[in-house]
Image: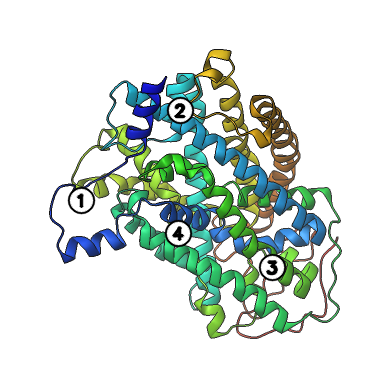
Amino acid sequence: MAADKVVETVVVGNYVEMETEGKPQNMKSKLSNFFWHGGSVYDAWFSCSSNQVAQVLLTLPYSFSQLGMLSGILFQLFYGLLGSWTAYLISILYVEYRTRKEREKVDFRNHVIQWFEVLDGLLGKHWRNVGLAFNCTFLLFGSVIQLIACASNIYYINDNLDKRTWTYIFGACCATTVFIPSFHNYRIWSFLGLLMTTYTAWYLTIASLLHGQVEGVKHAGPTKLVLYFTGATNILYTFGGHAVTVEIMHAMWKPQKFKAIYLLATLYVITLTLPSAAAVYWAFGDMLLNHSNAFSLLPRSPFRDMAFITFGFACTPLYFVWEKAIGMHECKSLCKRAAARLPVVIPIWFLAIVFPFFGPINSTVGSLLVSFTVYIIPALAHIFTFKSAAARENAVEQPPKFVGRWVGTYTINVFVVVWVLVVGFGFGGWASMTNFIHQIDTFGLFTKCYQCLPPQGVLPPPPHSFNTTVAPSPHHQPSFNHTHHNL
């Protein structure tokens, strides 16, 4: 056992990709390392924080209008804790898998380990297939949501083009992510992503407080079970961004240091999401039920136009899966790998144009995909991986005392599975699909400009029991003295 521990510390504690070890470094290589090669705990923290909230930040005020202020705050804290726990489980399973493989002299120098491979190595091909299906589908729609968000945001900066046209443009921009080899090379992008997310959150908070409450503001939520569970599932999705946890860990020089990183990232993200969602909901109240993007209610200003959410994090793991499927993953030519990745962008682009329902699509993905991908499957995988006494005794990392060791860990895992299955997938799936289908019935597929101002002389659709009306013009600040909802 002592010898095994030495192997595990020495081998698992060192990860290098495209390294230049032993070669003298000139100024060019030093700059490249500074901006490009990131494998520290700080890089992992930036990646986790950027990826965890990103575009969902703009839909959280909308979720608060569905849930009410108290439930919105409580669900953020609760799902933040739940998400941190399952990210911890994934990190434990990754280290367990990698340690076992490296004891067998498997070399991962030119191979990025992914979640479905961890499941395959620990539990077999059936677990691998289920994990692969859920993970790829979630990452696909996660990329779609990021693309929709970018088009929606830029529309409120420049509405000379409709949202669908902006989706075409940003789809082309999204294609540039094929040139980023792995999360080891996301250093500057993840830093900028977190910087812009932080700016956007505090812009929403300060702008809403300075704007003040609209005339006759109402805070009626929660009023309907459909809306309540739709909002709750959007928050489940917010703190379920760790479908890329394994890829981020693999990009670290010392992946065993990851355990606390996701919790610290979650705590930071909550300092962004709670003030911004609460402030916008306080200012605009039930009007948010018809405005899933919080930008649509704030007056145009240079400060609002500076707020932007980066994209691309969810694409990269899909590129890895595709490369492995076509046998290109270990190719050392960046240009060849980039060319091979381009077909992955096409379905992302297409689906963003088909389902541009920013807000409702978040909840639907959260209930049907996130619930299994990052909550249920990791908890069950941990239970089954360590179900035997021998597996628990020989585990690379033992559960901490403060959770009650193995008994406490199993208890928490069972709670996570039951809660997310019933509340997230069950009630959340029913509510989210009901709302999503309602968007299709009201706006139709391939809608040109979801929740945009109708043409002059065209009356908006009649009020509905869901969030379907159009947004006010971003050119001026309307007088919000009514909330035309049938609640």
Specify few, some or many for label 1: CA neighbours under 10 Å numbering under 14, 14-19, or 20 or more: few
**What x and y, as percent, mark residue 18?**
23, 46
Q: Which mark's residue is nearer the viewer, 3 or 2?
A: 2
Q: Amino acid at mark 4?
A: Phe
At label 2, the amino acid type is Glu
Q: How many marks?
A: 4
- Label 3 packing within 10 angstroms: few (<14), some (14-19), many (20+): some
Q: Secondary structure at mark 3?
A: helix
Residue 275 badge:
3
The answer to whether the residue labelled 1 contacts the one labelled 3, judged by CB atoms less than 8 Å apart, is no
Figure quadrant of residue 329: top left
Residue at image position (45%, 49%) is 314
Name the residue that disc number 4 marks. 311
- For disc 2, the marked residue is 96
Label 2 vs label 1, nearer the camera: 2
Q: Does label 1 or label 3 sit earlier along the sequence?
A: 3
Q: Of label 4 and label 3, which has the lower sequence position?
A: 3
Query: Residue flagged by tag 1: what amino acid is it?
Result: Cys
Quadrant where the image shows the N terminus:
top left
Sequence-wise first label, 4 or 2 = 2
Q: CA distance from mark 4 to mark 2?
A: 31 Å
Closer to the camera in the image, 203 or 215: 203
